Image: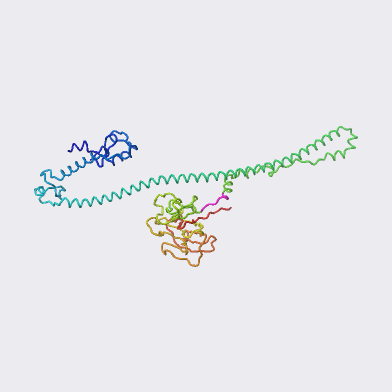
């Protein structure tokens, strides 16, 4: 029977007794799971034995072989139950030697003083241990399968991120190219206008010089003729001739105002162009870190506004997001990209349309997963549709009385003084001031539970 099983009942892939054998077009058989795994590895439907291509993804069950394997396994199981020495059914387990015994074996000198138990009892206990291990392995396999799926999604997510960044960057660079081209054309137009103006001035001087040269030439010619006259004629015409010869014409002076001011165009060229361009742009003192945003949130392409899409239609929801450790999982919030350890920092947030929001700061170690409600490590001001309140890790949520819903909240963080205050954009109304010595890096914090966005207001530098 052993030789029979080795030749006919072993799967060519796993080399074990067939488990749910299927028959391929070529006539060879294999376990269904083994054949499918072999196809996944090879990338095509080939027979593991002769490598002939299968025409179907679902080869039929080899029922004859399956029945034969079952008969063989039943026979082997029956043989395993018999004692090899006494040919009696083995019903006991020697706990000292870990051997299977029949009743005759138990009475032998070798096992007479050993502890023996029924096979069914020991098997039941060990099945329980194996089932626990099976459950653990099943959970671990599920975890690894989820990780594999997550990695596949990660690849798609990374490619989408790269395409988005590439497209947006190209658009921004194209805009900069257009602005540089306009600035170049403006400078060339100014240079052309100045050149034409100063050339016209030189042409006017040239015209005057030509007139003076002609006048001087006529006077010189007259004097030369007078000098050829006799002495009496020279004496008679002397006063008139001398008066005519006293011409006051002078060569015009060339000043720096009449030539191109090269330094105006070329001096600190790049710096001057950058200063001109900078006046056309605003910048955000804080940008959002997409890798910390909860899956419920949507952010704009410039990373300065955020809203909650949990209740909107599915087609408008953002793409899948990876569950990296920096991301908030349960709380609809997001952090700023840059954290602060020292210095003074200010940013203004437009909250006019939103009916549920919080803005403030969060410590770097803020809890991001496995929480219900707002995580600890947050200092913020917020509005829930009815009341304005402040929240910190120690006093929790406290309602602010006597204030209307703000349209813009200014966050002022002074880490040197250990002070965090919230005010209106003009600083005339201070809603609240926290005093706290922050011992770790803090990040701008934004919470949105409303479909209407909150936005970080830009800053325009003026010289």
Against 228, residue 403 (above or below) is below
Residue 261 falls in image quadrant: top right
Q: Position of residue 395 (x, y in %)?
A: 42, 64
Q: How is the image coloured?
A: rainbow
Give the camera-side residue of 20 and 431. 20
Seen at 40% across and 49% down, the residue is 322
Q: How many marks?
A: 0
Q: Position of residue 445 (x, y in %)?
A: 45, 57
Q: Position of residue 198 (x, y in %)?
A: 69, 42
Residue 102 painted magenta: no
Left or right of residue 357, residue 201 in this image: right
Work out which quarter of the rendered image holds the N terminus and state it. top left
Left or right of residue 229, residue 120 in this image: left
Residue 396 falls in image quadrant: bottom left
Q: Position of residue 117 (x, y in %)?
A: 15, 52
Seen at 13% across and 45% down, the residue is 82
Residue 279 painted magenta: yes
Magenta part of the chain: 278-284
Residue most extreme to the bottom: 402
């Amino acid at each position: 029977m052993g030789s029979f099983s080795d030749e006919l009942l072993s799967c060519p892939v796993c080399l074990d007794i067939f488990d749910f054998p299927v028959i391929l077009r070529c006539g060879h058989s294999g376990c269904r799971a083994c054949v499918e795994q072999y196809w996944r590895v090879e990338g095509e439907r080939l027979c593991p034995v002769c490598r002939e291509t299968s025409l179907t993804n679902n080869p039929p069950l080899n029922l004859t072989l399956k029945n034969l394997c079952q008969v063989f396994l039943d026979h082997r199981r029956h043989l395993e139950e018999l004692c090899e020495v006494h040919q009696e059914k083995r019903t006991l387990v020697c706990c000292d030697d870990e051997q299977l015994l029949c009743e005759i074996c138990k009475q032998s000198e070798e096992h007479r003083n050993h502890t023996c138990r029924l096979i069914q009892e020991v098997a039941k206990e060990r099945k329980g241990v194996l089932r626990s291990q099976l459950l653990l392995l099943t959970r671990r396999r599920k975890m690894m399968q989820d990780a594999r799926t997550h990695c596949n999604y990660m690849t798609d997510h990374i490619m989408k991120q790269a395409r988005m960044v590439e497209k947006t960057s190209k658009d921004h660079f194209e805009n900069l190219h257009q602005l540089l081209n306009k600035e170049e054309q403006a400078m060339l137009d100014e240079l052309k206008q100045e050149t034409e103006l100063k050339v016209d001035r030189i042409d006017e001087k040239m015209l005057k010089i030509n007139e003076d040269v002609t006048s001087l030439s006529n006077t010189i010619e007259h004097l030369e003729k007078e000098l050829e006259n006799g002495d009496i004629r020279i004496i008679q015409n002397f006063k008139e001739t001398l008066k005519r010869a006293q011409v006051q014409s002078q060569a015009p002076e060339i000043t720096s105002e009449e030539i191109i001011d090269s330094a105006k165009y070329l001096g600190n060229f790049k710096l001057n162009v950058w200063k001109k361009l900078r006046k056309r742009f605003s910048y955000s003192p804080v940008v959002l870190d997409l890798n910390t945003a909860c899956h419920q949130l949507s952010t704009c392409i410039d990373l300065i506004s955020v809203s909650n899409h949990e209740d909107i239609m599915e087609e408008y929801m953002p793409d899948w997001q990876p569950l990296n450790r920096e991301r908030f999982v349960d709380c609809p919030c997001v952090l700023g990209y840059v954290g602060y350890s020292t210095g003074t920092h200010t940013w203004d947030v437009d909250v006019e349309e939103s009916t549920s929001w919080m803005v403030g700061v969060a410590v770097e170690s803020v809890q991001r997963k496995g929480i219900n409600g707002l995580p600890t490590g947050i200092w913020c001001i917020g509005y829930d549709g009815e009341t304005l309140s402040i929240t910190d890790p120690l006093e929790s949520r406290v309602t602010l009385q006597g204030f209307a819903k703000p349209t813009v909240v200014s966050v002022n963080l002074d880490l040197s003084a250990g002070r965090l205050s919230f005010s209106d954009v003009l600083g005339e109304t201070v809603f609240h001031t926290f005093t706290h010595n922050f011992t770790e890096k803090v990040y701008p914090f934004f919470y949105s539970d409303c479909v209407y966005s909150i936005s970080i207001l830009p800053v325009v530098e003026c010289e």
